[in-house]
Amino acid sequence: MSDLLNDLVPAPKQDAKGSYSAKDIEVLEGLEPVRKRPGMYIGGTDERALHHLASEIIDNAMDEAVAGHASHIKIHLDADGCATITDNGRGIPVDPHPKYKDKSALEVILTTLHSGGKFSGKAYATSGGLHGVGISVVNALSDLLVVEVARDKSLYRQSFSRGLPQGGIERVGAAPNRRGTSVRFHPDPQIFGDKAKLKADPLYRFARSKAFLQKGVEIRWSCDPSLLEADSKTPAEAVLHFPGGLADSLQETVVGESLVTPILYAGEADFPDDQGRMEWAIAWLDQADASVSAFCNTIPTPLGGTHEQGLRSGLARAIKGFGDLAGNKKAGSITPEDVMGAARSLLSIFIREPQFQGQTKDRLTSAYVTRLVDNAIKDQLDHWLAQHPKEAKALLDNIVLRAEERQRRRQAKEQSRKTATSRLRLPGKLADCSRANRADTEIFLVEGDSAGGSAKQARKRETQAILPLRGKILNVASATSDKLRANQELSDLSQALGVGLGRQFKLDEVRYERVIIMTDADVDGAHIASLLMTFFYREMRPLIDAGRLFLAMPPLYRLSQGGKVLYARDDDHKDELLASAFKSNAKVEISRFKGLGEMSSPQLKETTMNPATRQLLQVRLDDFSGDGLGGQQDLGPNAEAIAGVDQLVEDLMGRKPERRFAFIQENAAFAEDLDI
């Protein structure tokens, strides 16, 4: 059998450069993975990630406070960039660990990923730390970290550098009147750069938010005065303590604002069956200035999640129910968007073993939380509305008004689209979408009739329209206005979009929310895409300014091995997938798409057209003035930057070939050798 296999699958030839053996397999031990790939643990090495180190230590101290074992936390920032976080909690255990008898529990926690007291739920009922990586990651990414622990009337200390202990734990003296943990660390310049330094302003804001979230804790803030900017509002010293919790925080933000109800809707509730608790504070403003700040176990979740979904649905159900009881027939049309449209909300929940999206915990994903928050907030708001009839009526009237405004806007858009459709002579080869209004619709400008046929079969008929284009369109940068008006392809394109060209173009009349250029993943396709982008820039630039022009990214290769099929967008991506995604001991079938027309409609849908699986590139205007291909930045209202883009388009697409030749010579250093 082995001989037969050898005959069927010839062994690849290996040279010294391409050899692959056991000695090439690396095993990263201890905290090496963190230093090797810090982005996996803290989201990168930028300023936000740098300050995430401090938040990890502060979160540990807050977990002690939430659990009822600490009443105050000290945060100090030195001029040299060292941060010290101290709590008066129980202190990290310092006795020998039963599994690693030659190490203390403190050293195990600081030097071992996925270690800590938050897995079983015995030491902490709720906590922000879930994976046991927080403080060990901080240790790995600090060139200095010193931990002091006061336990059992004794003070212990141990120092670390870049994740490695600089000696064992030592008892440094008696501490009869002290308890808790103090962590002093300095971010490693090898990871974050020599100029990177912790800043006072973001840390103070973070500390202040923590004090609001746990109304019983006192946070004592201090920093070296030299760290404060001239216009900074951050104090050098402050005691942060807010007995009213979230209500105190929200009250500060709405001072001077015109409110629908002068009484804030704030409170707290326990979830049934000891599943946790929640606290909230909400103010409805006359002017739309909506925002939701949500937290789980004191961890901010800027991307929201299931707790925010529960808040929205629970509030909407309660308001609609009150409207029904009040006999308001218009209340049935209320949606969560109407309720939250002018609500400034703070939400904090505490639950066991929450699930987040990623180690940075930007989004809560625990599915059951939606139901808990929904039911709790609805029940509490039902009581609040009944107890405050005057405020309840004012709130209902305001939200119903918002619902009516939303419906009027939708009807106006639908009428506008119907009117535009009825008066336009749409090109015969356009396969239009069926949705009457423009919301979430898109038109694909497809290279060739063959690809257009596949795209028509692959599209979602309700929201996706297809307009096949024949070959390369006119280069409007070098064509006369007469040629532009006479060109059939461009005429069909403007008719399909329902707008005129140049000064006659009106953004609000474009019949689709997105315009997507979909060409072959080769040089010819890139050329056609360049011609189309030049057309939109010259004749419909507001479409680009509004961020509504995109490039589709069809694959160039199909890779298959057994039942596994992957797609590669270019040669580099193909090589990456071959090296990482397939078994090295079996043949990988590689097929190259010569064009979109060679792809079956299911393949085109999966890779290029389905919003759930595709990738799009947004076409934007960048500043190319003065420095060739480098130094790009957002344009905004900068007239000089716009002039730079105009010049670039003229150089690359205009009537003078000598400008293109000069551009190629000036930017040859940016090009890579192409093996064609």
Image (cartoon, helix red, strand yellow):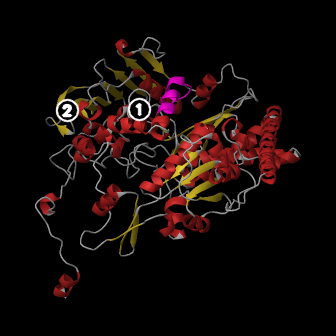
- x%, y% of residue 589? 34, 72
Nearer to the camera, 51 or 128: 51
Q: Is residue 549 above or below residue 434?
A: above
Q: Is residue 637 left or right of residue 323?
A: left
Q: State the residue position of label 1.
A: 70
Q: Locate residue 649 relative to residue 493 in the image: left or right.
A: left
In the picture, which quadrant includes the C terminus?
A: bottom left
* Residue 48 in the image: above or below residue 576: above
Secondary structure, mark 1, is: loop
* Count of labels in the image: 2
Q: Which residues are magenta?
A: 634-647
Label at residue 159? 2
Magenta span dominant secondary structure:
helix
| Residue 147 visible within the image | no
Q: Residues within 10 Å of mark 2 (few under 14, many from 20)?
A: many
Identified at 42% across, 66% down, the residue is 593
Asked whether residue 193 is in view, the answer is: yes
511 or 36, which is in the foreground?
511
Q: Are marks 2 and 1 in contact (CB under 8 Å)?
A: no
Residue 509 picture location, percent across and down: 73, 43
Q: Position of residue 137 (x, y in %)?
A: 30, 41
Tell me what residue is drawn at x 70 percent, y 34 percent.
342
User: Mark 2: which secondary structure?
Assistant: strand
Q: Is residue 587 left or right of residue 653?
A: left
Which corner quadrant of the image does residue 392 belong to? top right
Q: Quadrant of residue 578?
A: bottom left
